[in-house]
Amino acid sequence: VFDIALTSENTFEPSTFNLKLSEPMRFRITNEASYTHTFIIRSRSIFHSIAAGDTTNSDVILPNQATTFELVCRIHEDEGMVAQLIVE
């Protein structure tokens, strides 16, 4: 399980994730803010809307070739709420 926090500063913590090729991965996503955030990996069709104080899990099967995915909060993307998921 890989823990991700969605913060009240409109950031992902951590902001960069380095993961291994072809591994199934479960993200545990906790919204620490007092308002809703989203967790989106567009290229993997993953979308979660997470209410203030809530936690959700997301299962992802990572690709078998090196790549980088962008994670965004649709609500706060214009404010820079973006992170990188690097698969090596």
Image (tube, rainbow, N blue to C red):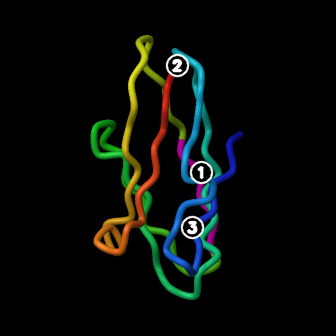
Q: Secondary structure at mark 3?
A: strand
Residue in the foreground of this view, choosing between 10 and 64: 10
Comparing labels 3 and 2, the label whose residue is closer to the camera:
2
Residue 86 at what x, y percent from top left?
49, 32
The numbered disc on residue 88 is 2
> To which quarter of the image does residue 65 belong?
top left
Count residues near mark 3 (Cα–Cα under 10 Å), then give few for <14, some for 14-19, many for 20+.
many
Q: Is residue 54 above or below residue 44?
A: below
Separation of residues labelled 1 and 2 (CA atoms): 22 Å
- Three-letter amino acid code of the residue under disc 1: Asn
Name which residue type carries label 2: Glu
Which residue matches tag 1?
A: 57
Q: Residues within 10 Å of mark 1 (few under 14, many from 20)?
A: some
Q: Mark 3 and 2 residues: CB-CB less than 8 Å, in contact?
A: no
Residue for point 30% across, 42% down: 45
The quadrant in which residue 29 appears is bottom right
Would residue 47 appear left or right of 18 to someone viewing this image? left
Taking depth in this image into account, of 56 and 12 the one nearest to the observer is 12
Which amino acid lies under the numbered mark 3 shown in the image of this protein? Leu
Magenta span? 54-58
Question: Mark 1 or mark 3: which comes first in sequence?
Answer: 3
The Cα atoms of the two marked residues, 1 and 3, are separated by: 13 Å
SS label for mark 1: strand
Spatial separation of the CA atoms under disc 3 and disc 2: 24 Å
